[in-house]
Amino acid sequence: MKRFVRMGIVLVILATLAVIASQLFFSDPPAPAASLTNATPGGKRPAGAVKYYRSTMTPGEISPTPRKDSMGMDMVPVFEADESMLTLSEHARAMASVETAPVERRKLSREIRAVGKVQYNESALSTITARVDGYIEKLFIDYTGVEVKAGDHLVEIYSPELVVAQGELLMNPAQSGMIESVKRKLRRW
């Protein structure tokens, strides 16, 4: 009985060795391990020569020869036929529901409904104050939101101080010192 058990074990070992030998001698040679320097994802190499090698971590880092990038990663080849081009088979395109169209210039329009609040651009608003006491007699800008430029008339102001200064200027034409001081006071206001 022991003899049959030993014989069975020997036969199992011989059968295992025969399977391994047939795999080594009669099958295609094993593909080399995929390396980033000589293959693309999936182990397939596209048609065309290698144009240059680029880093996967730093896209701007390129090299004419295969090497490691600044982060220690193998650089990936960029082939002449593969320059930033994604190609899909008909089946893959149908499965991904990809539609293609020629590039064209056109006006885009889309209605967007939103809730909001309209306000003034506060950086474009200015506050104008009078430098004399008085009140407004006539208003040239009579509603909010009118754009004005430098030199536009906004209001007419009545000021007792200005009336007194004007009277001083008109009453003393002979005194040049007094005229200059009144002119300076009016310019300051």
Image (tube, rainbow, N blue to C red):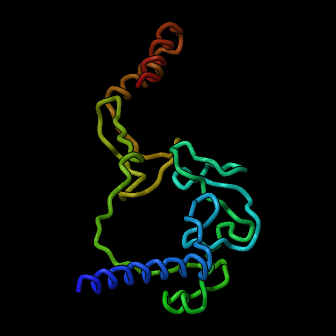
Is residue 168 or residue 68 the one in the foreground?
Answer: 68
On screen, residue 76 versus residue 178, left or right, reads right
How far across and down, in percent of the image, does residue 143 sit? Answer: 36, 59
Residue in view at x 54 percent, y 88 percent: 92
On screen, residue 55 versus residue 188, left or right, reads right
Residue in view at x 28 percent, y 72 percent: 115
Dividing the picture into quadrants, the one containing residue 128 is top left
Residue 76 position (above or below residue 171): below
Residue 40 position (above or below residue 173): below
Is residue 145 or residue 189 the one in the foreground?
Answer: 145
Residue in view at x 49 percent, y 81 percent: 18
Is residue 63 or residue 134 the one in the foreground?
Answer: 63
How far across and down, in percent of the image, does residue 10 sit? Answer: 37, 79
How far across and down, in percent of the image, does residue 77 sit? Answer: 65, 60
Residue in view at x 55 percent, y 69 percent: 41
How many numbered dots are placed on residues in this image? 0
Is residue 155 or residue 162 the one in the foreground?
Answer: 155
